[in-house]
Image (spheres, grey):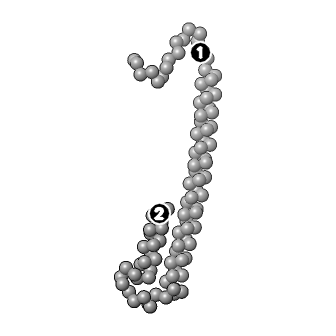
Amino acid sequence: MLCLWVLAFILVLQERDLLAAADPVSVLPGSLGRGSWCHEHDTIHERLDVIEEKVIKTVEHLESEVKSLLNIINETTSNIPIAPETPVMDIFDDTS
């Protein structure tokens, strides 16, 4: 978010030609240049909103998929019959 503010600040400075030390009267506060910048700014925000919505939907979809897979794994492992004399192995035990 900070990068967007920095980028917007740089664009404002370039639009008003402050970086090039232009005549301050050449760009008036209600000029056509500012309207164009505002339109571009609104367009960028609209695109960011769409991207944010897609990311949120994707994350929600992935969370549901992971939960589903974990439930399937849990059901599968609980239904596996274990023979009475089979030793239980600890897969996290590092001694081989």
- Tell me the element at label 2: helix
The picture places residue 82, in percent across and down from the top left corner, at 59, 15
Asked which secondary structure carries label 1, the reply is loop
- Judged from this view, the residue extending furthest toward the bottom is 25
Residue that appears at 55% across and 76% down: 39
Query: Residue 73: x and y, percent?
Result: 59, 30
Q: Residue 38: name its quadrant.
A: bottom right
Q: Is residue 19 left or right of residue 72?
A: left
Query: Relative to residue 32, is residue 38 depicted above or below?
Result: above
User: Residue at image x 59%, y 10%?
Assistant: 84
Q: Amino acid at mark 2?
A: Leu
Q: Which residue is mark 1?
A: 82
Extreme-top residue of the structure: 85
Quick one: label 2, few (<14), some, or many (20+) residues within 10 Å?
few
Q: Quadrant of the C terminus?
A: top left
- Which residue is at 62% across, 37% downward? 68
Name the kind of residue labelled 1 in the image. Answer: Ile
Tell me the distance, in whole angstroms, between the alpha carbons under discs 2 and 1: 57 Å
22 shown above or below 43: below
First in residue order: circle 2 vs circle 1: 2
Q: Nearer the viewer, residue 3 or 53?
A: 3
> What x and y, as percent, mark residue 46?
57, 67
For label 2, the residue is: 2
Residue lying at 58% horizontally and 62% vertically, measured from the top left: 50
Q: Residue 35 placed where, x, y %?
A: 54, 81
Q: Where is 29 relative to 11, above or below?
A: below
- Mark linked to residue 72: none
Q: Can you tell which quarter of the image residue 65 is in?
A: top right
Taking depth in this image into account, of 68 and 17 the one nearest to the observer is 17
Q: Residues within 10 Å of mark 1 (few under 14, many from 20)?
A: few
Q: Tags 2 and 1 in contact by the CB under 8 Å rule?
A: no
The number of discs equals: 2
